[in-house]
Image (cartoon, helix red, strand yellow):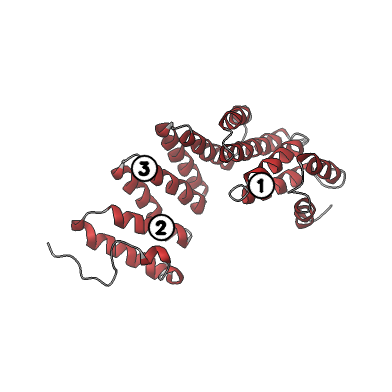
Amino acid sequence: MIDPDEIALLIRKVERASFRRLKSVVLQLGQKETWPSIASTLLKLGRYAVGKDAGEARNLARAALVAAGKVDSEIDRASLLVEAECLFADACRRLGRLRSAERSFVRAARHLTGCEVGERAYFLATLSDLREAQERYEESLALRARSAHLYGALGEVDREAAVLSSKAALEMACSETDEARSSLAEIIALIDRGVAGSFAVGAAVSFAALLGEPDFPKAIAILEKVRERYPELAESEEMAVSPIRLNSPHPRG
């Protein structure tokens, strides 16, 4: 068997090539490595690439679909197919190909029954992004709430926070201020569960911005908590532009 890092290295050598070339390499790898390992590596690379190069991620997702389709275990095959279809759909959405993304989610839904919670959460999160792009905002918000709940149940606090951040951003765009505050408060509550500092700082600053003057002491307390918990981010740009200065006296009523 080839080491997973070696698989990734071999794929990286051709990942920016045409899909035809990538598929050829994947089929060659299938002669000496297991299909689940190949599909998982392709998906890992694709999810990393999707925010930087949607075209590259789409090709990696297509190759992952080829590999996933050859997996013997029905359960493993279903999970890998769902993730690959979701990645493909996410890449298509970023490329402005919303119809292709929709069709991919329809295909993914056919395999959801036997999937693990993680794949379901990913399905809901990526589908919510498509619904936002389609201006179906209420559906998008509902999907994000469900996805965040599933990630929370899994203990994947950073992914839970990422979905909640997207949810809060859309709520603010829709002028649903109370709902946005609630979503941000959920992220702040994840501090005690080890959420990444970038999410905590972003949520705390946004939460402070949404509070009125009577709640400034509360906002300052939250910002202080974040600064103490993540000292490496205390002087970050986000904290610097906070609407509330931490060294200011509390407003008088």
Mark closer to the chain start, 2 or 1: 1
205 or 70, nearer to the observer: 205
| Residue hosting label 1 | 46
Disc on res. 173 = 3
Q: CA distance from mark 2 to mark 3?
A: 16 Å
Q: Amino acid at mark 1?
A: Gly
Residue 127 lies, with reference to residue 51, above or below; the image says above
Residue 223 coordinates in the image, percent (x, y): 33, 64
Per the image, the residue denoted by label 2 is 202
Q: Say which of marks 2 and 3 sits in front.
A: 3
Q: What's the residue type where badge 2 is placed? A: Gly
Element at badge 3?
A: helix
Describe residue 2's horizontal placement relative to residue 138 as left or right.
right
Q: Secondary structure at mark 2?
A: helix
For numbered disc 1, what is the local secondary structure?
A: helix
Which sits earlier in the primary sequence, circle 1 or circle 3?
1
The amino acid type, in three-letter code, at marker 3 is Ala
Instruction: Confirm whether residue 190 shows in the render.
Output: yes
